[in-house]
Every structure is written in structure tokens, then in C-alpha cells.
């Protein structure tokens, strides 16, 4: 008989403490999120029910580490379940499944018990310990080599085989929705994670500010968050092309206020999209004083000038950079975020640190509203769970300055040129029939200077291929990080 994996899920401590009116909703949302996590992991929920303050889960595949990433979960324990008649039978069952674990090692037995019994938790521990002791190196209650963890609930016992700590927090979906101003670097993804931990459904608003490379890798970061942490809904990635608006700012705004106005414009666009789609709040990765445009006075002036209709939340308010990066590593984001190249500052020096509301309002008044309206009319929304990173590259761009990780690279150079400057994993153009390639595959063409590849990419685009030319050709490739 095949035994399906069973888990005892300990919920975050604040959930059982909620009022009688609120608590059932929290459990209901948490259970739905756990089901979603299991299904995304390729599994199926066979049984799921509440036992006292915990959740018993049975699935057809191992999902311990997946469920341990659901917000609202304190711990996930893989367990064996047994219905017993008396203490002796219980102790013998536990001992039978624990002898090999304590062999030659010191051990301790920890028991949690609920319900009405003729014995105490200490009685259970002593009975099990006396049976296991001959097989072990002895009992050590202070610092054992192994610990036997057992929960007794009514007539059933749950023996822990393994356990994984969860993130805690409260279930996503119990606290409304928010739009995260998302660069993909270290700060905004951590801010997004912290907001989701407090039960908020988050979507990602990303501004294309220069090279599509930053947007490509920012999408990868958002997709990782969505796939590994955001359960119970379909997270979205909203892409706004801000390049024309940045040009407008650099033409018309005073140098020292450009960074402040850029931030104000981002707030303005985010607020309008939040109004249109219906988000309850905006979230940023700002930390007080971390950058010149993030001083308390600047943030105050920006908020007052923009008059956002949505509350702006800053989960990283009191974090320093070291703390943010440490949390980024813990979440699993660090390596992905390190690939994101932050857009160059439009005024890297002499940035105003104490702008007034009047100054911000005056400079914002210089911006042509038709440019803002154009930006707002052309934003794109992507389903993070279905979309591939390459799909967010603007289709009207034929030249790109990076190579997407999933791309097929075709080298158009002669054999001698290829040998003198080889490009790893590139396929010589003469060895394939491009017309027979899948039209769903991203193709990056490379020649010596970028001119031949540009024209071939245009021709392939007309035939329906997702073809791009590497800007600058091999010279451009040699400059890539």
C-alpha cells in the first residue's frame, strides 16, 4: 500500500488569536493558498482540514518546501499519523518508527498533547524514552543528537519525520491589493515580499527607462517572486515605457530637481493606474535617506505635490542596505536582483535634498500632459505565471543591447571571423535553415558591426519571427558584462 505524504501545518501565531469573526476567513484564505501552492508544484490535495489550530494536509507528491513558502505558515511538518487505544500502544508505535533514528545517538522526546487522556505529555515522553534508550547512546534532554517530536491530539498521534520553517505573516488576500513600484534591484523586491507577508495581493509596476536589459531581468525577479512566494492569485507585471517622459524631464526641469521630479512622475503614473485598475495602495522600496531623492523632506514635498489618491506604503522605511541585502538572500532573490542594472540617474550630482512643495509643483507644471497621457495609454499588463521574460521586450525594437537567456543566438560572420572572436553557444548561420525555426523562439542575430544582422532581423520580423539584432554587433557583444 502506497502511503501518501501527510503534513501538519502550524499556522502563524497571530492567526488563532484573531477574533471569532475574523479567524475563519483567515483559515479559509490560507487553505485556498495552500491548495494553489500544491497545484502549482504539480501536486493534488487529497485531504485538507483544520485540526484545532493546525491544518492537516495530504497530497500525492512531496510539497513540504513549497507549502513552507506560503505566507501564514509558521512550520510544515511531514508526519506519520496513527490512531491508538492506550499509552502502551502509542509508545510502541513511536518506538518502532524511531529506533533507526536514535541508533548510536543521544536523544530526547518532545510531546505536545491536546484532548482528554489518562496520561500526561511527560508520561508519553518517559514511556517512549524507556523503550528507545537501549537502542541509543542515552537520553540527553539539554543537547540531544536527535529529537523525537510527537503531537497527540485526541485518539490520534502525529510523529514528525521532518519539518521546515515557514515565513509566518498572514495569508495573501486578507488585506486587499497594492501596486509595487518595482525596479527589480535589491530594494523593491524585498519591499514587495514584506507587503505580501502582511496579506496584501501585490502586482508589479515597472518603468522602462533605458535599455530593455534592465526590464528583462526585473521581470525575472518578479516572476521568481510570483512563482515561489505569491500563492492564491495570478500576479501581474505592468510595463510602462517612460523613456519619452524622461526626455521631457531632461529638457524642461531644472538639473537639481530632475531626480525628485522623476520620482514624482512615477508616483503620478502609479496613482492613475491604481485608480484605473483598483488597487488599495502603492508600495515602494524607499528607505529614508538612502538616496538624495529619498530624504524625508523630498518625499513629503513629492507626496503633497502629487496628491496621490492611494496610500503610499514603504516597508523598508527603517532598513539599511545591509539589512535589505541580507533579507534578499534569505528570500532567494539576491542573485537575480544582482543582474538588474539600475537605470542611470538623470541628474547624478547636485540633487536637491530638501525640495519644497512649491518647487515640485512648478517643475511638474512644465511637463507636457500629452506625454503623460501617451504613457498612460500604452502600458502593458502581463500574467507573470504565463509570460516568458522575452515577451516583455517591446516588439517594435529590432536592436537590443543584451542577449536574453532563452534566446537562440545565430552568428552571421565568416568562419575566420568566428574563430578569431568566438561567441559561446552561437550557431553559425550556414548550419541552420532559419525559416524552419519556431516562430515562438527568440532569435538574436550577430554580425561584425550590427548592420547586416539589423536588416536580416527586420526581414524575419516581416515573416512573423521574434528576431532581434545585437546592437553594435560583435563589438557590442565584447562590451557585455
Image (cartoon, rainbow, N blue to C red):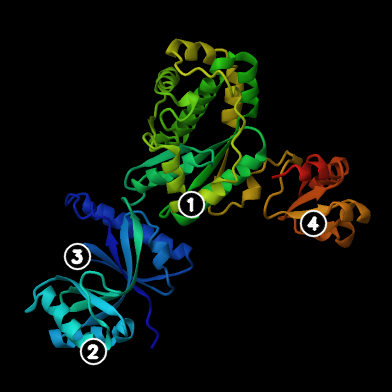
Which of the two residues, 423 or 306, is positioned nearer the viewer here? 423
Which residue position holds label 4?
426
Determine the residue positioned at 41% across, 29% down: 288
Which of the two residues, 69 or 100, is positioned nearer the viewer here? 100
How far apart are the two marked residues, 4 and 3, measured between alpha carbons? 59 Å
Q: Is residue 463 visible?
A: no
Tag 1 near tag 2, CB within 8 Å: no
Across and down, in percent, residue 320 comes to 41, 37
Q: Nearer the viewer, mark 1 or mark 4?
A: 4
Which of the two labelled residues, at mark 1 and mark 4, occupies the earlier sequence position? 1
Q: Is residue 129 visible?
A: yes
Which of the two labelled residues, at mark 3 and mark 2, occupies the earlier sequence position? 3
How far apart are the two marked residues, 1 and 4, measured between alpha carbons? 31 Å
Which residue position holds label 2?
134
Across and down, in percent, residue 271 comes to 46, 29
Regarding mark 2 in the picture, which secondary structure is present there?
A: helix
Residue 294 versus residue 161 in the image, above or below: above
Across and down, in percent, residue 78 comes to 34, 72
How far apart are the two marked residues, 3 and 1, measured between alpha carbons? 31 Å
**What label sits on residue 112 in the rendered view?**
none
Looking at the rendered image, the quarter that the N terminus falls into is: bottom left
Regarding mark 3 in the picture, which secondary structure is present there?
A: loop
Which of the two labelled residues, at mark 1 and mark 2, occupies the earlier sequence position? 2
**What label sits on residue 52 in the rendered view?**
3
Determine the residue positioned at 49% across, 31% down: 270
Corner quadrant of residue 46: bottom left
Which of the two residues, 301 or 203, is positioned nearer the viewer here? 301
- Left/right placement of residue 215 relative to residue 272 reads right
Amino acid at each position: 500500500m502506497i502511503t501518501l505524504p501527510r503534513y501538519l501545518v502550524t499556522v502563524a501565531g497571530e492567526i488563532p488569536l484573531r477574533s471569532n469573526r475574523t479567524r475563519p476567513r483567515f483559515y479559509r484564505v490560507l487553505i485556498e493558498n495552500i491548495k494553489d501552492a500544491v497545484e502549482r508544484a504539480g501536486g493534488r490535495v487529497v485531504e485538507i482540514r483544520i485540526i484545532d489550530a493546525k491544518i492537516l494536509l495530504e497530497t500525492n507528491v512531496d510539497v513540504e518546501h513549497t507549502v513552507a513558502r506560503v505566507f501564514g505558515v509558521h512550520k510544515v511538518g511531514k508526519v506519520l499519523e496513527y490512531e491508538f487505544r492506550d499509552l502502551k500502544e502509542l509508545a510502541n508505535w513511536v518506538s518502532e518508527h524511531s529506533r533507526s533514528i536514535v541508533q548510536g545517538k543521544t536523544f530526547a522526546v518532545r510531546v505536545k498533547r491536546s484532548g482528554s487522556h489518562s496520561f500526561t505529555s511527560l508520561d508519553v515522553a518517559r514511556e517512549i524514552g524507556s523503550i528507545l534508550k537501549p537502542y541509543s547512546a542515552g537520553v540527553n534532554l539539554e543537547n540531544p543528537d536527535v529529537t523525537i517530536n510527537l503531537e497527540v491530539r485526541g485518539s490520534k498521534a502525529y510523529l514528525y519525520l521532518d519539518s521546515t520553517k515557514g515565513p509566518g505573516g498572514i495569508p495573501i488576500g486578507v488585506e486587499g491589493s497594492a501596486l509595487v513600484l518595482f525596479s527589480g534591484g535589491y530594494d523593491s523586491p524585498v519591499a514587495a515580499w514584506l507587503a505580501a507577508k502582511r496579506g496584501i495581493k501585490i502586482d508589479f509596476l515597472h518603468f522602462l527607462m533605458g535599455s530593455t536589459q534592465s526590464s528583462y531581468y526585473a521581470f525575472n525577479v518578479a516572476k521568481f517572486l510570483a512563482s515561489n512566494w505569491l500563492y492564491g492569485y495570478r500576479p501581474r507585471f505592468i510595463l510602462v515605457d517612460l523613456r519619452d517622459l524622461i526626455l521631457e524631464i531632461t529638457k524642461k526641469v531644472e538639473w537639481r530637481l530632475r531626480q525628485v521630479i522623476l520620482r514624482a512622475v512615477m508616483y503620478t503614473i502609479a496613482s492613475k493606474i491604481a485608480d484605473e485598475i483598483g488597487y488599495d495602495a502603492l508600495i515602494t522600496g524607499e528607505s529614508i535617506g538612502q538616496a538624495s531623492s529619498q530624504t524625508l523632506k523630498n518625499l513629503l514635498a513629492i507626496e503633497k505635490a502629487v496628491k496621490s489618491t492611494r496610500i503610499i506604503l514603504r516597508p523598508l522605511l527603517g532598513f539599511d542596505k545591509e539589512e535589505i541585502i541580507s533579507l534578499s538572500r534569505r528570500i532567494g532573490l539576491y542573485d537575480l536582483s544582482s543582474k538588474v542594472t539600475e537605470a542611470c540617474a538623470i541628474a547624478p550630482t547636485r540633487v536637491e535634498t530638501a525640495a519644497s512643495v512649491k518647487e515640485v509643483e512648478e517643475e511638474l507644471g512644465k511637463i507636457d500632459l500629452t506625454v503623460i497621457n501617451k504613457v498612460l495609454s500604452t502600458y502593458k499588463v502581463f500574467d507573470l505565471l504565463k509570460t516568458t521574460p522575452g515577451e516583455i521586450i517591446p516588439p517594435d525594437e529590432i536592436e537590443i543591447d543584451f542577449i536574453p537567456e532563452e534566446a537562440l543566438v545565430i552568428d552571421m560572420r565568416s568562419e575566420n571571423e568566428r574563430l578569431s572572436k568566438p561567441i559561446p553557444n552561437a550557431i553559425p548561420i550556414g548550419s541552420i535553415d532559419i525559416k524552419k525555426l519556431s516562430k515562438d523562439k527568440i532569435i538574436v542575430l550577430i554580425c561584425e558591426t550590427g548592420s547586416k544582422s539589423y536588416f536580416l532581423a527586420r526581414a524575419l520580423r516581416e515573416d512573423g519571427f521574434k528576431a532581434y539584432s545585437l546592437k553594435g554587433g560583435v563589438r557590442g557583444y565584447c562590451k557585455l558584462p
